[in-house]
Image (cartoon, grey):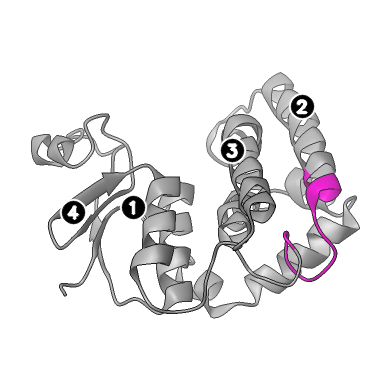
């Protein structure tokens, strides 16, 4: 069996989600750097891997995938290692619900509207940041309501829900507004401290 290949950039939240899944399963993989924001644009060859030119894309023994959720589920099911998905249908549904909620309502608000706007724009759009923080507050409130008792989002088992949430929140707390808001949600802040202590989080941290 050949080593799986992940195409993408180490700055990407979604590439990191896939990488954390690979790390948690103990899979040796190759990360092929691909910067979709490069001055030269997206290379034509990459569109064969992802027709929409986004990252990540994945390849294993000639089988190609794009979309982070599909990649993460394949990694969990195709490789040995600890299971990253609940066995029961309700647990799997909750896992999917959390990931979809973060994609639909959390990612843009927390990453782009707050963190990227504050870190990379001068002057920053304060109205955009304020709106992003309001949305982020709702996301964190709902995430708190969905979190089961136990160390992880679904209870005692670390799942793809945890791996999906961690990189998004990691980007959010790069800025003071994100850290201050997270501190208002003790259950999620404590969960975040646990996930950041895992080697999969450390090994996928962007250098610099």
Camera-nearest label, 2 or 4: 4
The crowd level at tag 4 (other Cα within 10 Å; few <14, some 14-19, many 20+) is few
Which is more toward the observer, 34 or 101? 101
Q: Earlier in the sequence, mark 3 or mark 2?
A: 3
Please give the count of numbered marks on the rendered protein: 4
**Circle 1 is placed at which residue position?**
9
Task: Identify the residue position indicated by label 4 in the image.
Answer: 63
Mark 3, residues whose alpha carbon is within 10 Å: few (<14), some, or many (≥20)? some
Where disc 2 sits, the SS reads helix
**Label 3: element kind:** helix
Closer mark to the observer between disc 3 and disc 2: 3
Compared across the picture, whether 28 is left or right of 62 comes to right
Q: Which mark is residue 100?
A: 3
**Label 2 neighbourhood size at 10 Å, few (<14), some (14-19), many (20+)?**
some
> In the rendered image, which quarter is residue 51 located in?
top left
Give residue 40's position: percent from left, percent from top.
Answer: 17, 34
Decide: marks 1, 3 in contact (CB < 8 A)? no
- Mark earlier in primary sequence (2, 4): 4
Residue 133: image location, x then y, percent: 76, 33
Q: Quadrant of the N terminus?
A: bottom left
> Magenta segment, which residues?
143-154
Residue 181 located left or right of residue 93: right
- Give above or below for 21 relative to 200: above
Q: Crowdedness of circle 1 by 10 Å Cα count: few (<14), some, many (20+)? A: many
The residue wearing badge 2 is 130
Dots 2, 4 in contact, CB < 8 A: no
Q: Marks 1 and 3, Cα distance to the nearest angstrom?
A: 22 Å
Tell me where residue 56 appears, x and y as whole percent. Answer: 33, 48
Residue drawn 86% across and 55% down?
Answer: 183
User: For residue 178, which numbered disc appears in the image?
Assistant: none
């Amino acid at each position: 069996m050949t080593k799986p290949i992940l195409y993408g950039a180490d700055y990407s939240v979604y590439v990191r989600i896939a990488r954390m899944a690979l790390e948690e399963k103990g899979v040796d993989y190759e990360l092929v750097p691909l910067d979709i924001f490069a001055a030269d644009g997206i290379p034509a060859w990459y569109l064969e891997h992802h027709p929409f030119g986004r990252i990540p894309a994945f390849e294993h023994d000639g089988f190609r995938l794009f979309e982070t959720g599909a990649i993460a589920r394949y990694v969990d099911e195709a490789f040995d290692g600890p299971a990253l998905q609940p066995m029961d249908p309700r647990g799997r549904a909750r896992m999917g619900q959390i990931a979809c909620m973060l994609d639909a309502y959390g990612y843009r608000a927390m990453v782009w509207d707050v963190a990227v706007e504050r870190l990379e724009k001068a002057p920053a759009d304060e109205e955009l940041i304020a709106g992003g923080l309001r949305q982020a507050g709702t996301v964190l409130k709902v995430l708190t309501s969905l979190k089961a008792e136990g160390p992880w989002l679904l209870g005692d088992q670390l799942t793809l829900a945890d791996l999906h949430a961690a990189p998004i929140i990691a980007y959010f707390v790069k800025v003071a507004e994100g850290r201050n808001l997270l501190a208002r949600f003790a259950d999620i802040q404590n969960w975040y401290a646990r996930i950041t202590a895992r080697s999969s989080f450390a090994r996928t941290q962007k250098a610099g």
